[in-house]
Image: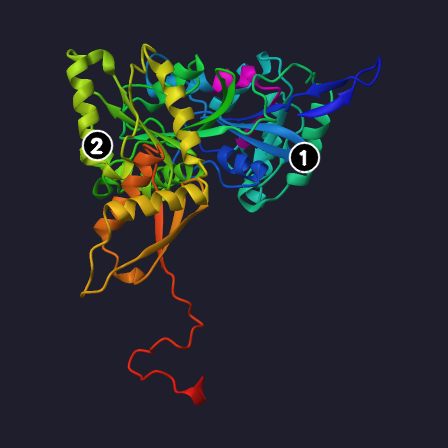
Amino acid sequence: MTDIEDEGGSTPVKLRAPRIAVVGRPNVGKSTLFNRLAGKKLAIVDDTPGVTRDVREAKSKIRGHDMTLLDTAGYENAKGDKLEARMRAGTEAAVMGADLILFVYDARAGVTSLDRIFADFVRKSGKPIVLVANKVESSAADVGVTEGYSLGMGDPVEVAAEHNLGFVDLDDVIEMELRGIDLTEPEEVDFSEAPVRIAIIGRPNAGKSTLINTLIGKDRLLTGPEAGVTRDSITIDHNWQGRRVQFHDTAGIRKKAKVHEKLEVMSVSDTIRALRFAQVVIMLMDATSPFDKQDLQLASLVEREGRAMVIGVTKWDLVENKSEMSKALREMAGRLLPQFGGVPVVTFSGLTGKSVDKLLPAIERIHNDWSAKIKTSELNDWLSEKVARHPPPAVAGRRIKPKYISQTKTRPPTFVLKCSRADKLPESYRRYLINGLREDFDLPGIPIRLIIKSDENPYDRTKRIKGREPLRDKER
């Protein structure tokens, strides 16, 4: 967003970032072009037609100007309730919501009948259009470039997105086209505020995209009865009850033994990348089959990445005895996920929206706990009390003495404990201290790191060296 002065004085007028939609039929190189303009590999790229299904957004800069890029699903001439028809509807909505359209076609294949059908729709939208002839890295594309004039969209801009050719000319044309567009309307989201990044993960068909659509109040993401509809991890900025959040919709993750296809492998990698980028993870489970083995494996992945977690149980409207089921869910969470002791369990219906408003308070609390910083004096008072109440067991007849503890970082809370004979401290005692930190400092549902270090001075030469006698006076 850019500040300019209005005509009457010095009052700054906020200019929102223009929205540029990259559109075209399947397999013309839209996602490759999108990644080039974004400056990073965000969208999944493959030779298989129809890889992109949802509209994906990315913030970028072109010639120093902020832009919002939209990668869209390939346009297909499909109708009804089929997946391709729902993808088409999403692409058409992206066209109508954009300020500028980059209409991409494959110059090697030439202009097809589907290109002409989609071009008619785009022209009727009344939006400014830049015609992009992609895949012009060889002379085989010369005829296709000439055919582009028949689409009635002006001169084609020749690029080869895969080989990074022609982007200087494309940037020139984009910059020129944006000059006549009114960008003074306010943004829906205040991008000056740092967002809370929330990734929603779970098994395929758990209702992740449906939940996000309910939370933002519109059908932004593609949903349906088919398992594995979502392939890319889609980021959506939203003003949720006065606070900026980023929802990361992810592809459902199946058991590793069942993941063979190249596209699914890339989707899983994209999900893991979204998980690493997130601050809070909503682990979404189906109320009719919660705490599946795959759910537990995903929770272990969240713990390894050190992210705060909230368990969301959707399809709650299908549960008959809700009070009994709620009690059972919390018992299973405590028993099966001890590494997330006290993790919040929120029940709701993602489809109807009932009780989804309980999610934000749970996310806010756990995000604050994940960022908590505890004073060193309080930690050491706590350590003295814990050790006095339950000292570490002696090993080989020698005591282990915990001496000092401090918090070295947050997100997740990480502590360093100095003690004698650090390598001999039993794992059970380490768990005792971690559970004590979680309970006594009210840190439920977040992973806690406790690093055990020796308090011995490595430069103290008076210590006996293994296998040698103490140093003589002349050696000191």
Magenta range is 91-105
Magenta span includes 223:
no
* Residue placed under numbered mark 2 in the picture: 334
User: Where residue 57 sits in the image (x, y, percent)?
Assistant: 51, 28
Residue toward you, 238 or 150: 238
Q: Tag 1: Cα neighbours inside 10 Å, few (<14), some, or many (≥20)?
A: some
* Residue placed under numbered mark 1 in the picture: 171
Quarter of the image for the C terminus: give it: bottom left
> Height in image: 414 above or below 16?
below
Query: Residue type at mark 1?
Result: Asp
Magenta span includes 103:
yes
Query: Residue type at mark 2?
Result: Gly
Disc with the residue nearer the chain's start (2 vs 1): 1
Measure how far apart labels 2 and 1 are at the Cα level. 55 Å
Give the SS element for disc 2.
Answer: helix
Residue toward you, 403 or 118: 403
Q: Is residue 376 visible?
A: yes
